[in-house]
């Protein structure tokens, strides 16, 4: 028990445990956000959507995950194997490490910690948190381009370039809307931006149009419908 208390009171080990917890929560949330997206799309298109696996199809994300793990991994003989396998890993990795700077709960202290000492519910606290997220998000383009390049097929390469051009085109308005938030809160640190909004009001109230544009560009950057060209479905 003392070892557990020591680990939880140490910022480094607490950040490691928080990273693992955030990873599990995000992967679960992604699965069920996709489930909700499929149900909403089915409602729009006058069909049922997932409704077979579990009550109301709630276990469909689990079945999809098992299917994904059991599918045959086909690598064409003419591709650059190393880069071909690296491309999806790169796209996945850069999408996850962006969450490292998000403040999940501010500063707090455990009851057994010495008076005056606090611990931050954040994996990494950096001075340029917002710019870090923007920079990491832009790296996802490399996964798309690398996949087309490594295929050694001119049509796949053209498709990768087209998808990359689409992703890049939305980064300009996204950056402009993020700049609006930076100028409003007057900080690049995400925890300071949260503190500012707690003392004033949510920035979305001051700039609703910028929030709508940011939401649309975020969908495009994440390759969600209707901007899912990069997924090559």
Image: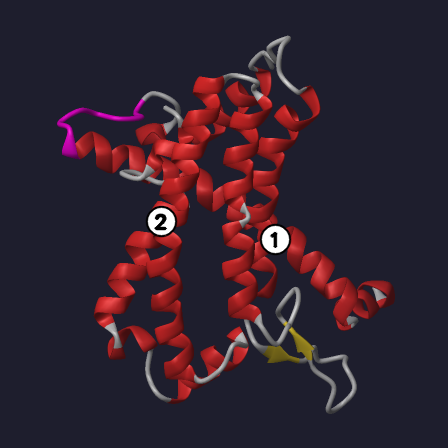
Which quarter of the rendered picture does the N terminus lie within? Answer: bottom right
- Give the color scheme: rainbow, by chain, secondary structure or one colour: secondary structure
Picture coordinates of residue 143, whole percent (x, y): 55, 37
Q: Which residues are magenta?
A: 44-51
**83 vs 192, nearest the viewer:** 83
Look at the magenta stretch and give its main secondary structure. Answer: loop
Q: Which mark is residue 36?
A: none
Picture coordinates of residue 207, whole percent (x, y): 26, 75
Give the residue drawn at x 43%, y 39%.
Answer: 164
Picture coordinates of residue 188, whole percent (x, y): 52, 77
Residue picked out by circle 1: 97
**25 vs 68, nearest the viewer:** 68
Q: How far apart in space, not on screen, are marks 1 and 2 (Cα)?
A: 23 Å
Which residue sits furthest right?
3
Disc on the earlier residue, 1 or 2: 1
- Secondary element under disc 1, as helix, strand or loop, is helix
6 within the magenta span: no
47 within the magenta span: yes
Q: Is residue 49 left or right of residue 150?
A: left
Q: Is residue 138 left or right of residue 123?
A: left
């Amino acid at each position: 028990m003392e070892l557990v208390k020591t680990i939880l009171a140490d910022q480094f080990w607490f950040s490691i445990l928080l990273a693992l917890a955030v990873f599990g929560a995000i992967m679960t949330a992604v699965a069920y956000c996709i489930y909700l997206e499929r149900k909403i799309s089915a409602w729009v298109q006058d069909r049922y959507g997932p409704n077979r696996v579990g009550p109301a199809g709630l276990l469909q994300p689990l079945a999809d995950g098992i299917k994904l793990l059991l599918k045959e991994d086909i690598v064409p003989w003419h591709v650059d194997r190393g880069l071909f396998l690296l491309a999806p890993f790169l796209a996945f990795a850069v999408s996850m490490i962006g969450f490292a700077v998000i403040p999940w709960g501010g500063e707090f202290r455990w009851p057994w910690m010495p008076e005056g000492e606090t611990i931050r519910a954040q994996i990494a606290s950096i001075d340029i948190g917002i710019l870090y997220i923007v920079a990491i998000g832009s790296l996802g383009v490399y996964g798309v381009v690398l996949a087309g390049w490594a295929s050694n097929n001119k049509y796949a390469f053209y498709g990768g370039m087209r998808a990359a051009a689409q992703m890049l085109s939305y980064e300009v308005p996204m950056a402009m809307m993020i700049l609006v938030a930076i100028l409003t809160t007057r900080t690049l640190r995400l925890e300071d931006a949260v503190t500012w909004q707690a003392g004033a009001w949510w920035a979305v109230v001051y700039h609703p149009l910028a929030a709508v544009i940011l939401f649309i560009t975020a969908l495009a950057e994440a390759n969600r419908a209707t901007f899912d060209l990069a997924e090559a479905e």
